Amino acid sequence: MHIINSNKIRSLLEYFIKNPGDNLNKFWLGYEYEKIGHMSSAMGYYLSCAENSDSDLLAYECLIRKAICFRSQGEREIHVRNSLLLAVSLMPERPEAYYLLSQAYEISKDLRDEDKWQQAYAWARIGERITKKFEVAPLLTKTPYHGDYLFSFQQAVSLWWIGRASESLKLFTQLKNNKELDDRHKECVNYNLETLAMKQPTLNT
């Protein structure tokens, strides 16, 4: 059990008592609770904010953060996907939920392999197309989505597992030359290219 000793949380709670309808305050309360591992409290504030906010962007970010909280708890995959599907339906022009959905299907344990890899590929493909059409405002907090190349990476991994090895190899080769790649994905791309070259069906994701 965590001890709440954050001055920021105390300040936000004091404000919340006086202004229970301030949805932005609810969001930041949720985020502060999330940071210290109080996921149930965090999700409660995110849910209240999403349901009552007049801002689609703020509600969208609450749903993204709810999905991140559910994932951190483990064994909550259906809740992760449902939160992300709600986010997509709310703001289909944004990239984050598409990427997180692709990831969610990739690591899912409650679906058949042939289903989850097709889903992972489809959501990454849609997200990639969306990012080319819209410019979007930044979110208030950082998420696992930090670049369009992540869609290519998700597609490359998924293509291998659904039997389209040559397309997978082509995408990984293109990613190897992408200067925006972060260190972790550089390592994964190099590993996966070696794996493909040896024709061994295990990929580093």
Image: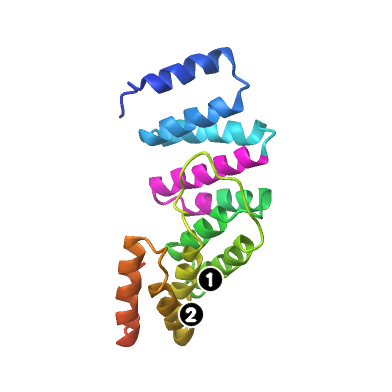
Residues 187 and 103: in front is 187
On the image, the x and y values in percent for residue 103 come to 47, 61
On the image, the x and y values in percent for residue 147 come to 48, 58
Magenta stretch mostly in which secondary structure?
helix
Residues 142 and 42: in front is 142
Q: Looking at the image, which residue is at 51% across and 42% down?
A: 66
Q: Looking at the image, which residue is at 50% across and 51% down?
A: 80
Q: Identify residue for label 2.
A: 162
Which segment is the magenta one? Answer: 56-81
Q: Residues at badges 2 and 1 in contact (C-beta under 8 Å)? A: yes
Residue 169 visible in rendering = yes
Is residue 75 covered in magenta?
Answer: yes
Q: Residues within 10 Å of mark 2 (few under 14, many from 20)?
A: some
Q: Looking at the image, which residue is at 63% across and 41% down?
A: 57
Secondary element at image label 2? loop
Examine the rendered structure and indicate whether residue 94 appears above or below residue 40.
below
Q: Quadrant of residue 161?
A: bottom left
Q: Identify residue for label 1.
A: 121
On the image, the x and y values in percent for residue 18 come to 57, 12
Q: Quadrant of residue 200?
A: bottom left
User: Mark 2 to mark 1: distance in Å?
Assistant: 9 Å
Report the amino acid beneath label 1. Answer: Tyr
On the image, the x and y values in percent for residue 87 come to 61, 49
Residue 199 visible in rendering = no
Relative side of 5 to 85, left or right? left
Report the amino acid beneath label 2. Answer: Ile
Examine the rendered structure and indicate whether residue 114 appears above or below residue 59.
below
Is residue 191 covered in magenta?
Answer: no
